[in-house]
Image: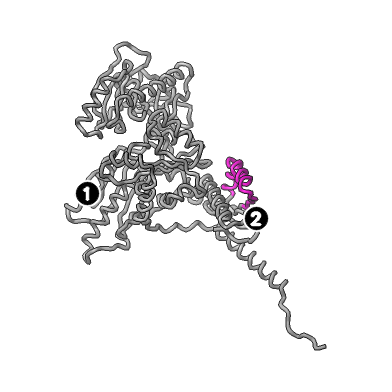
Amino acid sequence: MARNTKRRPNYSKRRRSNKKAEKKKLEADKNDLTLPPMEPTPISIDKGKLREEAIERAKKRPIRERILAFFRRETKQDYKELIINTEALERRVALIENGVLQAFDVERLDEERMVGAIFKGKVQNLEPGLKAAFVNIGQEKNAFLHYWDMLPGANNDPSIEIVRENKRKTPHNRVEAKSIQEIPKVFPVGSEIIVQITKGQIGSKGPRTTTNLSLAGRFLVLMPYAGQCGISRKIDDKPERSRLKRIISNLSLREGMGVIIRTAGQNKPERFFDRDLHLLLQQWDEIEAKMKSQDSPCFLYQEPDLIGLTARDFLTDDIDRVQIDRKEDYTRLIETIQRISPKSKSKVTHFDEEIPIFERFNVERQIEQTFMRRVLLPSGGEIVMEETEALVSIDVNTGSHKGDRKDGKNFILQANIEAAAEVCRQMRLRNLGGLVIIDFIDMKNKGDQRKVFQKMKSSMADDKAKHNILPISQLGIMQITRQRHDESNSSGIYEPCPYCSGRGIVKSPRAVSIEIQRKITSVVRRFREENIEKEANLKIFLHPSTLRRLRGPDSKLIDRMERNYGLKLTFEAAETYHVENFKLIDESTSNEIR
């Protein structure tokens, strides 16, 4: 028989070669983790497409809501939505108008809410040079209390018109100083004092406080010791102001108490104010009971969480829809609304789709750009933002502009006007405050400078934070001061960089842990969509600081994910990996999951 001399393929050798290639690729992937992640390139978001999607959602509202919205806002066509997302460590609320993100707030569920909290403390020391007292309120840092904030009525706001006096006729137990000179005698070191936090701890600075307490309701702000009643000057309709003055005069206030009618109270019937005052007085009675029964330093009152604030402050008449993804929060929001504004219940819906709610409404990718240095403008220009502890500097650049004329004159004005509107939006989204310096593209024409200044003022008109805007100077610089009650949003995502002794920032282990958990959830969802029934074995390469977070405070969350999703998760950490980097590998294929 003739021998078959044809050469057979060596499959075992090929398999060994493939394994070596896979091992080499895996080692290369690991080495990539030692490098810092590349800064993402900002992308231009199609606001027209977002608006079209919002219009389609608006058409699906109940007919009753559409009719009410039409009569409430007359010719106004904006569609406003509140999107609430709750995860294991964070709760996020986004306000989108015609699909575009306009405001964004984050509540870290493992941290205490400080702004608005009331404490019974002890004066630790007095600093005559600073004209301030430092108060022990039982927190990590002593609270800062300026002498001016210790005088009765020192929080009088020029934006409030005082229309009624309700001074106390009989003495009360509260100790008060009538002038700054009296403060060291009235409040010596060791004396007890009731304070309310007006600005949270920022960096190394302790919280700022006042003795002029206030409790905010939906339509009223109760000031237990003020003795003055007023109306917000933002309500500029004269007949409406006259009606609200009559309502204030009819309110059954206790002796020495004051109230302020908020802008949300405009055009509301009198019974709404009576109900709001009743709820606020109940709150105050509970606080007073704690004052008498507890020793200092002690905690007396805390502002509501984001669910309570949504019902009280965010869910106004111009909000068309509220979508919330957690059933427990939906139930609690409905219960809160039932007490303070029952007719708003129909606006709230529970979002129960498989896709994450922020992805469903294109909010996640808009938030991602909130933390970028560069922000693109529709005309092709861009703004570059740098945040420091003392101020925020913003530079407006031409970028890859699309000017209408060869001399670029129209474009410069157009880019600067776009930049003015975007800067206002970014300050709200990033919760920026303090001194803001904006370097616009040079404009010689005074009329163009005035147009940009007016655009800035109109864009900032709806900003709830107190602010002051100065016209463009001879150097082409605009200066803005904006009040900030808490740290900027970026401070919760980033922490001082261990690689450069605080000169830069990197994401915290907590933030990276949240990203890993979101990534795992996204992978499981993708497997289900592809009808992959096998048990997923994922290996995660990460920095030891993140691993410590996952095996420490977040270990229960990881265990729950493994049980609920049928996962097997293994981790490999190395100090050489960058703290922000992590990589997911499918162990069955040795392929990276992107």
Q: Is residue 307 visible?
A: yes
Q: Position of residue 120 (x, y in %)?
A: 44, 22
Above-or-below relation of 25 to 175: below
Which label's residue is closer to the chain start, 1 or 2? 1
Left or right: 78 in relation to 241:
right
CA distance separating discs 1 and 2: 65 Å
349 magenta-colored: no
Query: So how many labels did they put on this image?
Result: 2
Q: Image quadrant for the C terminus?
A: bottom right
Q: Position of residue 429 (x, y in %)?
A: 38, 45
Mark in front: 1 vs 2: 2
Q: Residue at x 37, y 51 (%)?
A: 56
Q: Position of residue 388 (x, y in %)?
A: 38, 46
Left or right: 288 in relation to 455:
right
Name the colouring of the figure. one colour
Above-or-below relation of 303 to 23: above
Q: Amino acid at mark 1?
A: Ser
564 magenta-colored: yes
Query: Residue 263 is drawn in which quadrant?
Result: top left
Residue under label 2: 534
**Which contiguous range is marked in magenta?**
544-572
Query: Residue 187 is drawn in which quadrant?
Result: top left
Instruction: Tell me the number on the disc at residue 473.
Output: 1
Dominant SS of magenta comes to: helix
User: Do residues under tags 1 and 2 come within 8 Å of each other at their CB atoms?
Assistant: no
Q: Amino acid at mark 2?
A: Lys
Q: Residues within 10 Å of mark 2 (few under 14, many from 20)?
A: few
Residue at the outermost front position: 63
Q: Residue at x 32, y 15 (%)?
A: 255
